[in-house]
Amino acid sequence: MSVQVAQTDKDAFQRDGVVPLRQVLDADWLGRIAAAIEADIHQPGPFYHGYETEGEGRFHGNLRLWETHATFREVCQNSPLPAIAQHFFDSEKVNLLYDQLFVKEVAMSQRTRWHNDQPYWPIRGWQVLSIWIALDPTTAANGRLEFIRGSHKWGRWFQPEVFGKTSAISQYERNPDYEDIPDIEADRDSYDLISWDLEPGDVYVFHGMTVHGAGATACRIEDVAAIPCATPVMMWFTTRAPEPANRYCVTHSAMATRWTANATR
Ligand SMILES: O=C(O)CCC(=O)C(=O)O
């Protein structure tokens, strides 16, 4: 599938660390993804890690779905998404690190804590991005993602913390090279926060070092469709390394990339 990414979008990504792209996935893709998510909710794949929540709604999490579920594999390999990563990296070849699913049901009062992603991952280097897919309309009222403009260039590696109580992991190993993230939520006015409303099929493309968080879905149930706010995310990186800073290393075999996309854009 031919995908075009405007130079202005690439410039915005480089400058701000995030850019929304509109109508990347059509109704057919969205329908297939929604069905795959329903299937995972009812019969979770092996890396399921639901979080305990304080509100009524559940917070279903899973990752590496492409390894066991044909639709997620299709999305990772044959949807417009790999080509988008190729465009942003100006690279013929990109590698998938893993895919991840966040399903926040309505009336769930839990935020996704502020963090940047790359400290969670066994990946170093600059050419690292995520593509976050909106399956439902996402607004300030139902917990859209927010980003700190330009934070990918801070050079600050924040200590990973769990997103909520989950049976999968109680806490992350403390890395002496990382710092604790400040309480951004308590000091929002001090930061240049950016966010956009998204429609189903829109995506965010954001850098692995961009600090971001998401609100709760604790809007009134009648305000939003009574379906989960489900968000698959794919993380991509490229091994193309024109300068030493772009070298990458994979230190964790379980997460090592298993396939690459090098199709013609
Ligand atoms: O969708 C969410 O609530 C969180 C997504 C996120 O933090 C991520 O993709 O890194």
Image (cartoon, rainbow, N blue to C red):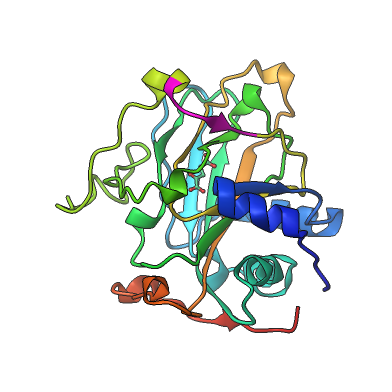
Which residue is painted at 53% across and 60% down in the image?
129
Locate the C terminus by quadrant.
Answer: bottom right
Numbered marks: total: 0
Image position, residue 134 (x, y; %): 69, 45
Image position, residue 253 (x, y; %): 32, 77
Residue 8 lies, with reference to residue 83, above or below; the image says: above
Residue 73 lies, with reference to residue 138, above or below; the image says: below
Image position, residue 246 (x, y; %): 42, 72
Which residue is painted at 64% across and 37% down in the image?
228
In this view of the protein, can residue 205 be seen by the observer?
no
Image position, residue 196 (x, y; %): 68, 34
Locate the N terminus by quadrant.
Answer: bottom right
Residue 193 in magenta stretch: yes
Q: Is 236 in front, or is 134? A: 236
Q: Is 179 in front, or is 142? A: 179
Which residue is painted at 74% across and 68% down in the image?
79
In this view of the protein, can residue 197 be seen by the observer?
yes
Residue 163 in magenta stretch: no
Which residue is painted at 64% across and 73% down in the image?
90
Magenta residues (range):
190-195
**Residue 123 falls left or right of residue 7:** left
